[in-house]
Amino acid sequence: MIGFAYLSRDEQLDPRTKAGDVLLDDQSAYSIITGLPHLVSVAPKSAIVGKEFRYFLKVVDSDTPNDQLSVTVISAPTWMQFDDTQLVLSGIPAFGQSDTQRVVLSISDGNNVVQESFYLLILENSEEVDQL
């Protein structure tokens, strides 16, 4: 059974929430937690050749403490590194790599594994960002 709960504006799960509960608060909750680990940070849409790229991942699970979640990179561009202790994807795209590149992540809570992916458009220069 997948449970649903809402996070408050400060992204803290109400301590009364149990799997299977549906909670609505007066603050109009921001995120729905499904009982499976998942990515809640919004991935950047682009990176610029020759400029440092950094994306700080944020993952949550309604029934597992954040420090017990693990993230693994399944596939990523060759220029990208992953710091699994800080949950940061980073690197500098090189010239000749300007295209759309896919990043696939695996997020686990020890019982469930979910794959999430996003696409990153590699731009030759920052002027192209203004045209997006």
Image (spheres, rainbow, N blue to C red):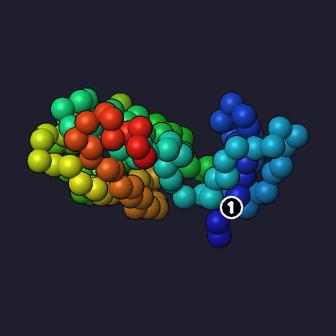
Residue 131 visible in rendering? yes
Residue 8 location in percent, x, y?
74, 37
Residue drawn at (75%, 44%), measured in percent from left and top? 29
> What amino acid is found at the position of numbered circle 1 in the picture?
Gly
**Would you place residue 16 above or below residue 4 in this image?**
above
Tell whether 129 sits left or right of 59.
left
At x 23%, y 54%, the residue is 99
Looking at the image, the residue that sits furthest to the right is 26
Look at the numbered disc 1 and give the secondary structure of its residue: loop
Question: How many residues crowd mark 1 within 10 Å: few (<14), some (14–19), many (20+)?
Answer: some
Please tell me which residue lies in front, 109 or 105: 105
Q: Answer with left or right where residue 22 lies relative to residue 127.
A: right
Residue 72, given in percent of the width and then of the height, sits at: 31, 50
Q: Quadrant of residue 129?
A: top left
Residue shown at the point (70%, 58%) measured from the top left: 4
Q: Position of residue 21 (x, y in %)?
A: 77, 57
In this view of the protein, which residue sits in the foreground, 101 or 116?
Answer: 101
Q: Is residue 128 left or right of residue 34?
A: left
Answer with the quarter of the image where residue 69 lies: top left
Whether residue 90 is visible, yes or no, is no
Task: List the residue tagged with mark 1.
Answer: 3
Name which residue lies at 33% across and 35% down.
Answer: 127
In the rendered image of this protein, does residue 102 appear above or below residue 12?
below
Q: Quadrant of the N terminus?
A: bottom right
